[in-house]
Amino acid sequence: MHNSAMPRVGSSHEMASNPEDLTVTNNHNQLHHVVLQNHSSNKSKSNTLNSQRNAMANGGELKLTILQMIFEALGLRNQAQNREPTSKDIGTLIMLGFMFLLFVISVTGFFVMWFTEFYNNTMLENLILAKDSDTVKTWLSPPSKYDTLLKAHIFHYPNIEDYLAGRADKIKIEDLGPLTYQEHTVKDEVSFNDNNTVTFRDHKSYKFLPEKSSISEDHMVLVPNIPLLTAAVHVKRFPMFERLSVAWIIKQYKEPLFKKLTAGELLWGYEDKIIKLKSLGMGKRRFGLLMSRNGTSVDSVQLNTGESDINQYGIITQFNGMPQLGFWEGDECNRVDGSEPTMFSPNLLQNRDTVNVFLQVLCRKVPLHFEKEEIIFNDIDVLRYRTPLDVFSHPSENKANECYCKNVDICLPSGVINATRCYNDAPIFPSFPHFFSGDPILYKDFDGIQPNAELHQTYADIHPRFGVPISGASRVQINIMLDKTPLLENKANRLKNSTILPLMWIEITSGEYSEDVLHDIYFSTFGLDAIQLALKYGTLLISVTSFSLIVAGVYYFNSRREEHLQHHLQHSKSAAELEALNGVPVGGFGNMIVQVQHIDMPVPLAINHQRQASA
């Protein structure tokens, strides 16, 4: 094609026969050969690149390693194809993956610790009374280091004979005590039920602590004759023949209205002639105010273990096999759904709402109102609950007590509760010690009654996390009502009918904790709180740190990508310039090729040029 573009000078035979023509011819052939080689090389390179592009466009057979695929997903496709990633790239990629995993875990932990009750609920699972668990084993038979103290105060009537004889204006009462006992409680006759409840009886034992007592058990006291006052109420309800016969027998005993006993006899029992009567004592021979507490209780209790619902933990569901009592009027007062006094569901304490406690000594529920947050035992936070002042108020003052004044023979002024049906019709009327919060009319004839909130009101310091009272005092006074029946004859002439005579009051408190117990309390308070805070702020710190490292890793890869793109653009520019010099367009290996294969020079010019060169 190029021969037609320029005039032909001579045939190849003519050039070959002339040495000078041969030189020109050889030069011409060499140049033609070089240009053909370059053209062939460029064409081959063009075909190779085009085949690679077509293969990638058509999903061809280019194979990428997993690492290269990851780089491609990160926007480093060219880097993955053109060179192997550096160890720094791989290390950064591994760190980025690890940080992402750590970030997901820490963020999950952050939301769990900050916005759920997962941690607290996990801790609360240790409270559940699951059968054969360590918690149950401790609850069934707690170590003696957790024993409580029972403090008994006896009301002594030193001038009662003078008062009855008219030689004194008021009845003098002395509060003697306390007599302090170490109270150890274990569970007896235990049965775990299918409805997530457990039935048991308390078994209590007592040890006198003279070093913590103000009087001894041998101290003589003059107190109301409880069996006689009780018999006076019972006998009047007997059929006529039985009533007359029993009354005649009792009169033969010549029992006094007030009786001299030792403190130990009054509390733990003594043989009494009236009690021995089958119609009154029901086969018993002894009587004592606390005698029924010593040993296995006659009352059985069923409570919720908390396995199905932690909010029901410690709630009493049955008392003596019955879900309701039969002592009061209406379902509300007869329900036994108060908490057992030694355990409360922590969830019920969170809102500082009123909690109800079922007290066996009263056969009823008693509300506890939140008072304040308190600090005891060197920086241990507790929730202080107290009994309201109107818990024993007359229905005219506290409408909620109306059901406790129905279905009874008599409803007395504020301050006492008629519990006769709870004590087999014995005229027992409990109250707070020294008739605290009661109507002064109850003790207007007594000298020595001094109500004091700090000494006589019930309170409980409850651990907010575990719902266990770790301090406090449960206080109740036992009184007996005088019913002036013919059995008493002229023994109580000066006393008014229905006079409430205080017998004793008791308070149950936590013992003096040893260093071992205090260590347990401190750990349960500060140790678990510290773990919770560490998890809360630890997950927050790890979340922020891992997120920062993820951002740094992404920034690193983005920088590497920009750097590579710049390098790739520079390389493309250089390649384009080289291709242009070789006759290959930048946009691809097109159809136009610069043709310099033949350079036809005029023969004389060529010969002259060669001669000049030779010269």
Image: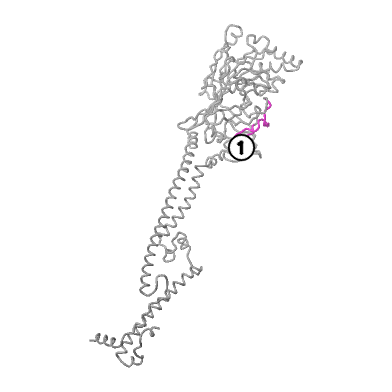
Residue that badge 1 annotates: 305
Q: Is residue 321 left or right of residue 77?
A: right
Q: Which residue lies furthest to the right in this view?
A: 241
- The residue lying toward the viewer, choosing from 88 and 577, is 577
Q: What element carries label 1?
A: loop
Name the residue type under label 1: Thr
Could one spot residue 193 in this view of the protein? yes
Where is residue 38 drawn, in percent x and y? 38, 78
Quadrant hosting residue 563? bottom left
Instruction: Determine if the magenta segment contains residue 304.
Output: yes
| Residue plotted at (56% across, 36% down) | 347
Location of residue 198 (image quadrant): top right
Q: In this view, does 175 lie above or below 89?
A: above
Q: Which of 285 and 536 is in front in this view?
A: 536
| Magenta-colored span | 301-327
User: Is residue 588 a member of the stretch shown in magenta?
Assistant: no
Q: Which part of the image, by quadrant, shows the C terminus?
A: bottom left
